[in-house]
Image: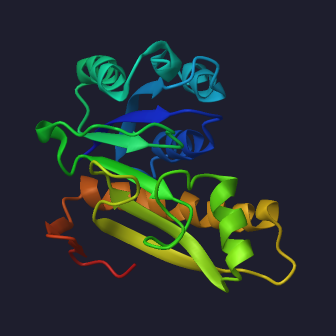
Amino acid sequence: MSLRLVVLLSGGGTTLQNLIDRSEGGGLPARVEGVISSRAGAFGLERARRHGIPAVAVPRREFADDGSFNEALWQAIEPFRPDLVVLAGFMSLLRVPPAYHLRIVNVHPALIPAFCGKGMYGHHVHEAVLAYGAKITGATVHFVDEQYDHGPIIIQRACPVLDDDTADTLAERVQAVEREIYPLAIQWIAENRVRVEGRRVRILGATP
């Protein structure tokens, strides 16, 4: 099965580009049907347009509260009829309609439940990992629920924290992990191999 994806982002779109490249190269059984940004100037919109993918902005700053923003956001998502909504550096809290339960995924640049939650995104995460003195970090792909970085975990993969790491060097290592496990999680969903039992996610026939 080839999944119809809508990607939500707020920034440069490097995760989006990875998914587009793998889809166009035949390595991902999914197609990005639309891209929506919470920031009008996000470069991720331009990345989408370069590949002929419809791209629209629903700027968070134009709405008085999360409720009205989410209403407009879902009005933009629905016409694409996505099988899966993919968060790719999306900086706003997403409300999950009942019809999209377990149909939204996110990647987080740490091993949830460590270094996650509100305010923990991008370099804030890597700086916190270094400040704590953690020896291992990594990335997590999870289903999205009504809380930041909280839904059932699909896959995690670790990488080392080196003694001379900066937030930049650590980010590069973690992003390399993200580039591998995010498409893999989407592939498993496309292949109908993901089973969710409460908070526990089982992958049929796969060893992460």
- Looking at the image, residue 154 sits to the left or right of residue 42; the answer is left
At x 20%, y 52%, the residue is: 102
- Count numbered badges in the picture: 0
Q: Residue furthest front?
A: 64
- Looking at the image, residue 32 sits to the left or right of residue 22; the answer is left
Q: Quadrant of residue 72?
A: top left
Indicate the position of residue 77 as horizontal and vertical percent values. Answer: 30, 24
Above or below residue 208? Residue 12 is above
Above or below residue 155? Residue 74 is above
Q: Residue furthest top?
A: 62
Q: Quadrant of residue 184?
A: bottom left
Above or below residue 192? Residue 128 is below
In the picture, the quarter occupied by the C terminus is bottom left
Indicate the position of residue 59 as horizontal and vertical percent values. Answer: 50, 18
- Foreground of the two, 136 or 18: 136
At x 30%, y 78%, the residue is: 206
At x 67%, y 67%, the residue is: 128
Indicate the position of residue 56 as horizontal and vertical percent values. Answer: 47, 16
Above or below residue 147? Residue 136 is below
At x 53%, y 67%, the residue is: 139
Indicate the position of residue 32 as horizontal and vertical percent values. Answer: 41, 33
Q: Residue furthest right?
A: 164
Give the image's coloring scheme.
Answer: rainbow
